Image (cartoon, helix red, strand yellow):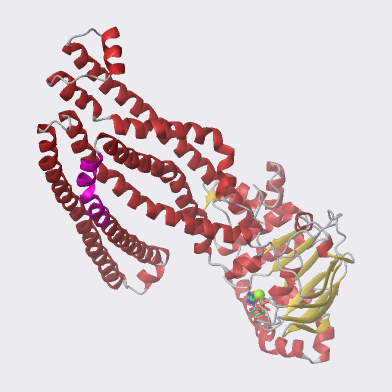
Amino acid sequence: MKKGKINITHLLSPHWKALGIAFVAVIGESGTDLLEPWPLKIIFDYVLSSKQMPAWMASLVHSTLGDDKLAVLSFAALVVISIAIVGAISSYTEDYLTTSVGQWVMHDLRRTVYHHIQRLSLAYHDKKRTGDLISRVTSDIDAIQSLISNVLLGMLVQILTLLGMIGVMFYLNWRFTLIALSVAPALFLIVYSFTRRIKQASRAVRKKEGEVISVLQEVLSSIRVVQAFTREDYEQRRFEQESIESVGIALRARNLKAMLPPIVEIVVALGTCLVIWYGTRLVISGQLSAGALLVFFLYLGKMYKPMRQLSKMTDTVSKAVVGFERIREVLETDMLVRNLPGARKAPRFKGEIEFDHVTFGYEEGRTVLQDLNLKIEPGQLAALVGPTGAGKTTVISLIPRFYDPASGHVKIDGEDVRSFKIKSLRQQISFVLQESLLFRAPVWQNIAYGRPEATRDEIVRAARLANAHEFIEKLSEGYDTMVGERGVTLSGGQRQRIAIARAIIRNAPILILDEPSSGLDAASEELVFDALARLMEGKTSIVIAHRLATIRRADVIFVINEGRVVESGTHHELLARGGLYAELYEIQFRKEEMDDLESVSFSARNHN
Ligand code: DGT
Ligand code: MG
């Protein structure tokens, strides 16, 4: 399936064989539905009374079963069984095939949408709410699946059955049919309006259930806060309130649902009255056979089911149409950041990074980086410092092309990053971010995420270099220990060291670090710091630095303010200059330096 271009024929065309067979089954289903009352007609007309059988039936019965009334009875019994068997096979075949087609189409759509979503630029993901995307991949695709599995051919069965019944009745006696069907419009209106109201009520029920779940989820995910502030009782009341409201709404919906069948039965009974009244008189006067009257009775009773099914199906159809639109919207979103025509595989980088008059903004009309220039030589350690919101994180996001600049060039080894294939570019960049995300997987897999083909030995070596080996060994199952959804079972420093091992094993020539500054105690900070130093060896590294120790070691420091590089140089050069850096140093790092000295002497005291 081509991206961005989906329609229902595209989705269904690979399954035309299954759908063709299913269509035959549909005809079998409708046909058997229509034929169901006919064995009774045979018994009434040709066994219990002595009407003349049609010639074809007479010759069929006489040639196979004999020529007495019992033979006709056996024939009717055989017809009952045959109809049941054909009906059962048809219904099973239709159900099985449509369900299978529905499931495969769902799989196809999920795959396509997921593939697309993963590659949409971060600019898109920043704007879209995750929940919304999730509901598109799940509920909306589900609605389409449900349409194909339950409605597409099911609707056909109901329509064919309904039309078939009316046709047969007209064939038997058209005037009587008009009388018998006089209740049908009323029946249809009642079924239609009730189904609509039931639908609205069910929607309200579902919404309320969603709210109950939200409250639950909210509290469970912040249970620490709830307990810390002892708000359990308040949360209990809030939950009960939602739950009570949900009971009320569900009862109202149930009430509507319970009212429909009795009302329908009364209307059908009215119709039946008419049929009995006129029909019996027709039978007495010989204008209609008793068996035909029976067929009328039974059809009238059955007619309400397809009507009801059809009104229900309109709901599924409208949901699927909406779902389809929403999925198409995602698929038609252009990939803003994508391989340019003529992009080539990046060679192994030496690691020179340059920003050449780069201007960038996340939204129209608001620039974040303004004509920014900087150059980092291969193998250098560069530190970005600056006040919060200055644009440091934005700068590092442009190097792997999470976003593209509005104007200017981001270059690696003298070439615009847009001239490389994205995958080959990103493969040569390692990240260690402030918040180290671990996946729900064993430790070794989390390390190998940076290079899935890594061997066990390489993983252990990386863990050693990252100062992580020791604590991993002490975990209950060593490298096979599962770490939680967000690595909750590990401390901040431990998570960070696993992330460093992940970056080490990737062995990329360019390293980007958003240096963790908080949440680490002095001892683990030491270990993380040590690991980082090893990781940076021989690589071009850009660090958003929060710690004086890192900044001081940097070969070059870029001071960023309001989206521009306002100063650059080494620590001493910048201090001597007495500009923004010196100012930052005074208010931020000076204190840290004092603390450091203090904590050193403190731990020294402790060791003694
Ligand atoms: P930090 O991390 O607090 O030290 O600040 P920086 O220097 O890393 O700042 P940065 O690059 O995250 O943000 C620069 C400006 O861009 C700031 O005004 C917020 C804005 N900004 C950052 N990320 C996004 C984003 O994803 N979407 C939009 N619309 N604006 C963003
Ligand atoms: Mg930042």
Q: Quadrant of residue 122?
A: bottom right
Q: Report how many numbered discs are placed on residues in the image.
A: 0
**Residue 19 versus residue 358: which sits nearer the camera?**
19
Query: Does 373 appear above or below 243?
Result: below
User: Could you tell me residue 567's position as x and y percent?
Assistant: 81, 85
Please state if 246 lies on the left or on the right of 138 as rendered: left
User: Could you tell me residue 3's position as x and y percent?
Assistant: 65, 53
Who's the residue at 83% across and 82% down the image?
A: 568
Return the residue found at the far right: 414
**Residue 561 versus residue 359: which sits nearer the camera?**
359
Please state if 248 lies on the left or on the right of 351 as rendered: left
- Assign the C terminus to one quadrant of the image: bottom right
Who's the residue at 25% across and 67% down the image?
A: 245
For ligand 2, the image quadrant comes to bottom right
Query: Does 418 appear above or below 9?
Result: below
In reply to whether residue 445 is colored magenta, the answer given is no
Q: Quadrant of residue 216?
A: bottom left
In reply to whether residue 188 is colored magenta, the answer given is yes
**Residue 467 versus residue 588: which sits nearer the camera?**
588
User: Could you tell me residue 35's position as x and y percent?
Assistant: 29, 29
Please state if 340 lies on the left or on the right of 68 as rendered: right
Write down the region rendered in magenta: 174-189
Please state if 235 lies on the left or on the right of 532 as rendered: left
Main secondary structure of the magenta stretch: helix
